[in-house]
Each structure stands twice: as C-alpha cells, then as structure tokens.
Image: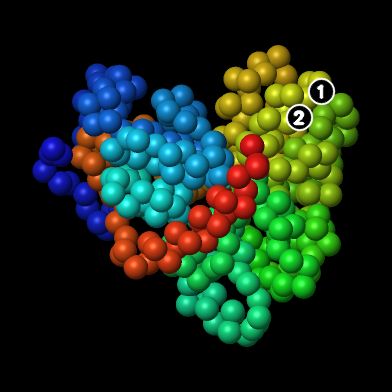
Amino acid sequence: MTDVAVLDPVVGYIDEPIDPSLDLFDAIEQLKREKNAVLLAHYYQEPDIQDIADYIGDSLGLSRKAAETDADIIVFAGVHFMAETAKILNPTKKVLLPDLNAGCSLADSCPADALRAFKARHPGHIVVSYINCTAATKAESDIICTSSNAEHIIRQIPEDQPIIFAPDRNLGRWLMRQTGRDLVLWEGVCIVHETFSEQKLLRLKVRHPEALVLAHPECEEVVLRHADFIGSTSQIRRFARESAHQTFIVATEEGILHQMRKDSPEKTFIPAPPESGCNCSQCPHMRLNTLEKLYLCLKHEQPEITMDEDLRRRALRPIERMLEMSAAIK
Ligand code: 13P
Ligand code: SF4
C-alpha cells in the first residue's frame, strides 16, 4: 500500500524532502521490484532517468511496450500524452507520471473542441493525428500515428480519401513532400524543433564538412532541407549506429545523444544549434521529470493518470488502428 497521499494537485508532483544520503538509483530499483512496476522512458529524458529505465524508446516503441507489459504499475518518464496513451491501452493498470505538468506544445495547440470545429469545416475528411495530442483529441481522430509510422500509414489510405493531419504542421508538410498527398494541416509546432537555426546549422556544416545531418521531421522545412537523414528518434539512433560515418549533427532534442554516444563511443555527435543562446534544444516539459520526482512518484504511487471510461474507449480505437496499420514497422 502507499503512504499517506501527499500530492498537491496544483503543484502536480510530490514535493517532500529526501534524505540526501539515499542512493536514488538503488531506492528506485527496489521500489520497482517490490511493486512489480516497469519504468518506460522516452529518449528526451535526462541521462540518469534513461539509465534506470527498463525500456527507452520513441513514441511507437513506448506505446507497444505499454500494450504488452505484464507489470502492475507503469511509471512513465515522458510527457502527459504518453502516459495517457499507456492508460488508454491499460485501463486496469496503475499509470504514473512523475510530474503532471509535463505537457507538450503540440498537444496544447489542438484542443478536442477546436479539432471538432475544424472537422466540421472539412466534411468528408478523415483525421490522422500525431500521437502528440490529448486523449480527447485522439477520440476525435480516425487514426493515430507517430513519426516512425506516419508515412507508412498515410500511404495505406486510399488516394481519393481527403485527410486532415493534426497537430504538427512540420511533420504534415514533410509527409506531403514524401507521399505527394495533399493534407489539410493543423498549424501546431513543437517548441523545441522549431528553434533550430538554419544559419547556425550551415556554419556548423562548414566547420564539419564530413558530418551527416540527422533531423526529426518536427523540424522546420528550412532545417530539414539540409538533412541527410530524416526520421523519428529511434530511426535517427539506428541510422547513426549502423552508419559508416563518424560525425553527425543531430537536429532533435539533445537527450537522444545519450544513447547515441553509448551505442557508438568512437563517433562524434554534435547537437544542432538553436536560434538563441538558450537551452532550447532541451524540451522544458520532458525535463520536468527528475530522479527525485521519479522516486517519490513510485513510493507514493502518485501522480496517477485517471480517465473517464467512455473517453478511453473512444481514444483507444484510433490507437488500435495505428498499431494494426504499422505492425510491419520495426
Ligand atoms: P519520437 O520519439 O516518436 O520520434 O517523438 C519525438 C517527440 O517529440 C516526442 O515528443
Ligand atoms: Fe512536445 Fe516537442 Fe517536447 Fe516532444 S519535444 S514533448 S513534441 S514540446
């Protein structure tokens, strides 16, 4: 059983003093064992969290893991829409998110009622939504996709079927270029991927002419057009691991570099520079999760993701279609 609940719903995470002599890695491992909990982490989590995770992956891999786990508790080291997806797939399991404030600019850009109104203005269209959206927005969608399977899914939709693609306009534009399809786009952006600077990237390429540029399709077109490879986080990681090249400029959230450097310690990975001199290539939502919050979340089994059953069922349908339509994607 859990200790007395200490979650302040306004704060959104458990805030209590932790003995500074406690080894958080050991303590988290022990709690995972005691509670039969699995820790799923996205590549954009801080390195310590990645190192203690049972599985690290992209949005598709994490959804698949969430669908197949036999753990009693899923602790999601990622953002809210990811933990919600795990709950949609696992209604009887407890799904925990260390900080409920870990949102996403794409999910925020596309509330369900606004998407419903947009659909009404585009009769006859089906809605393919990027997984970076809320459960309520998923429930308004016909098919969900991730950056790993979006192109594969769009290509399976009959040519004469008009499509609304929400909420990421950069991923949508890239899909239009890849498939030659005319998609009606929602105008959402990722605050991390939109900040990479084309000018600074070009200067970096001059200094490292041997480097390949690897970019996530959430980046702006001005950045994507300089990329040698475009793909999801797991596809970028795999490309770098299998490539004979030695140097890579990586245009996505810099958390991914941790696994890329572990995979290939002899290779050089350079984060693509953002526009200003800020830390903008770290996602401020993803980075709300810390080892301390993770420990307290497991200890108290809070904050927990809960969901109305009718909403869950409506959001499940388009996720199941995604999993069926992308079964062939590794
Ligand atoms: P993937 O890891 O699925 O490529 O998604 C990237 C992302 O921005 C997740 O929020
Ligand atoms: Fe959302 Fe961008 Fe952060 Fe991913 S990196 S969670 S898309 S804001």
Residue 248 is tagged as 2
Q: Position of residue 295 (x, y in %)?
A: 29, 33
Q: Where the C terminus falls, by quadrant?
A: top right
The residue lying toward the viewer, choosing from 99 and 167, is 167
Mark 1 near ligand 1 (CB under 8 Å)? Answer: no
Q: Position of residue 313 (x, y in %)?
A: 39, 63
Residue with the most extreme left position: 4
Question: Are the two marked residues, 2 and 1, in contact with CB atoms closer than 8 angstroms?
Answer: yes
Q: CA distance from mark 2 to mark 1?
A: 8 Å
The residue lying toward the viewer, choosing from 107 and 176, is 176
Q: Is residue 68 above or below residue 135?
A: above
Query: On the image, numbered disc 1 is attached to which residue?
Result: 245
**Scheme of colours in the image:** rainbow
| Left or right of residue 173: residue 79 | left
Residue 119 is tagged as none
Q: Is residue 34 above or below residue 231?
A: above
Dot 2, how many residues are within 10 Å of its Cα: few (below 14), some (14-19), or many (20+)?
many
Q: Where the N terminus falls, by quadrant?
A: top left
* Residue 86 showing in the rendered view: yes
| Left or right of residue 42: residue 151 | right
* Residue 278 showing in the rendered view: no
Looking at the rendering, which quadrant does residue 163 occupy? Answer: bottom right
| Left or right of residue 177: residue 236 | left
